[in-house]
């Protein structure tokens, strides 16, 4: 990239990813997809039958980045790298994503209590026909949780729209005994891997 003020597109609605990019000085514009009944089929997040969690995360992140890059021409936007990401949990080989409702959030947290799970965040950068990816894998161990603790946390609203029904950057930090890996990856965007990918596309990180 040779502009005076290099920028990228972030294909994500996550405020946490926006905050993390801002933290390391990455200039970006949001590239948002349609949601709800009019959601773009290219960005669907339903797992495929028998799909492994790491394969799932990489596939979804790649699909979002590719679709974002294709929209630049349609919307007549300047050509820049498109960054997308997907975060999911691996609980004994099972994909655990965002909770459907509060009851599902409580059930997920009950499964995570007193045990270790993996947090997988895949990132993808696309520009024109080029696509590059990285996968951040971290381990998180929760302490034992009481039913009352889980109910209070779910009632706070924090688990909604978060993979695994918790945000480590919020109140759920009280549940975490140990992490191994990338804290920013657990939040939703591994900054080390993101910086290296963007550097490969010419962004001066």
Image: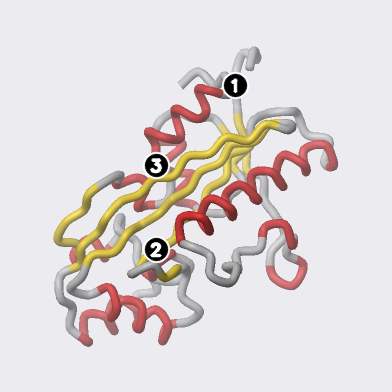
Identify which residue is drawn at 63% across, 17% down.
1
Q: Earlier in the sequence, mark 3 or mark 1?
A: 1
Q: Which residue is mark 2?
A: 89
Q: CA distance from mark 3 to mark 1?
A: 21 Å
Q: Nearer the viewer, residue 35 or 116?
A: 116
Q: Earlier in the sequence, mark 2 or mark 1?
A: 1
Identify which residue is drawn at 48% across, 67% down.
161
- Of badges 3 and 2, nearer the viewer stands 2
The answer to whether 36 is drawn above or below residue 88 in the figure is below
Q: Of helix, strand and loop, which one carries label 2?
A: strand
Instruction: Judge from the rendering whether residue 21 lies leftward or rightward of residue 180; answer left or right.
Output: right
Dot 2 crowding, Cα within 10 Å, few <14, some 14–19, many 20+:
many
State how many labels appear: 3
Q: Nearer the viewer, residue 123 or 170?
A: 123
Identify which residue is drawn at 39% across, 42% down.
190
Q: Which residue is mark 1?
A: 6
- Which quarter of the figure is the C terminus placed in? top left
Identify which residue is drawn at 40% across, 54% down.
120
Residue 165 sits in quarter: bottom left
Q: Of helix, strand and loop, which one carries label 3?
A: loop
- Residue 58 location in percent, x, y? 53, 50
- Of badges 2 and 1, nearer the viewer stands 2
Q: Which mark, by number, is residue 190?
A: 3
Residue 114 sits in quarter: bottom left
- Of badges 3 and 1, nearer the viewer stands 3
Tell whether label 2 touches label 3 (CB within 8 Å): no
Q: Which mark, by number, is residue 18?
A: none
Instruction: Judge from the rendering whether residue 64 lies leftward or rightward of residue 192; answer left or right.
Output: right
Q: CA distance from mark 3 to mark 2?
A: 15 Å
């Amino acid at each position: 990239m040779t502009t005076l003020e290099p920028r990228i597109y972030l294909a994500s609605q996550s405020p946490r990813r926006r905050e993390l990019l801002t933290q390391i000085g990455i200039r970006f514009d949001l590239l948002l997809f349609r949601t709800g009944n009019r959601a773009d089929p290219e960005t669907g997040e339903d797992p495929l039958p028998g799909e492994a969690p790491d394969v799932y995360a990489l596939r979804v992140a790649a699909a979002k980045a590719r679709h974002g890059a294709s929209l630049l021409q349609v919307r007549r936007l300047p050509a820049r790298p498109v960054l997308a990401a997907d975060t999911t949990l691996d609980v004994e080989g099972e994909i655990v994503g965002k909770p459907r409702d509060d009851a599902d959030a409580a059930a997920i947290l009950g499964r995570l209590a007193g045990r270790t799970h993996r947090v997988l965040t895949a990132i993808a950068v696309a520009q024109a026909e080029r696509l590059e990816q990285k996968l951040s894998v971290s381990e998180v161990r929760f302490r034992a949780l009481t039913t009352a603790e889980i109910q209070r946390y779910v009632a706070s609203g924090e688990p909604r729209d978060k993979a695994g029904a918790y945000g480590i950057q919020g109140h759920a930090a009280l549940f975490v005994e140990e992490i191994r890996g990338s804290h920013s990856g657990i939040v939703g965007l591994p900054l080390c891997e993101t910086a290296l990918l963007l550097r490969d596309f010419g962004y001066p990180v």
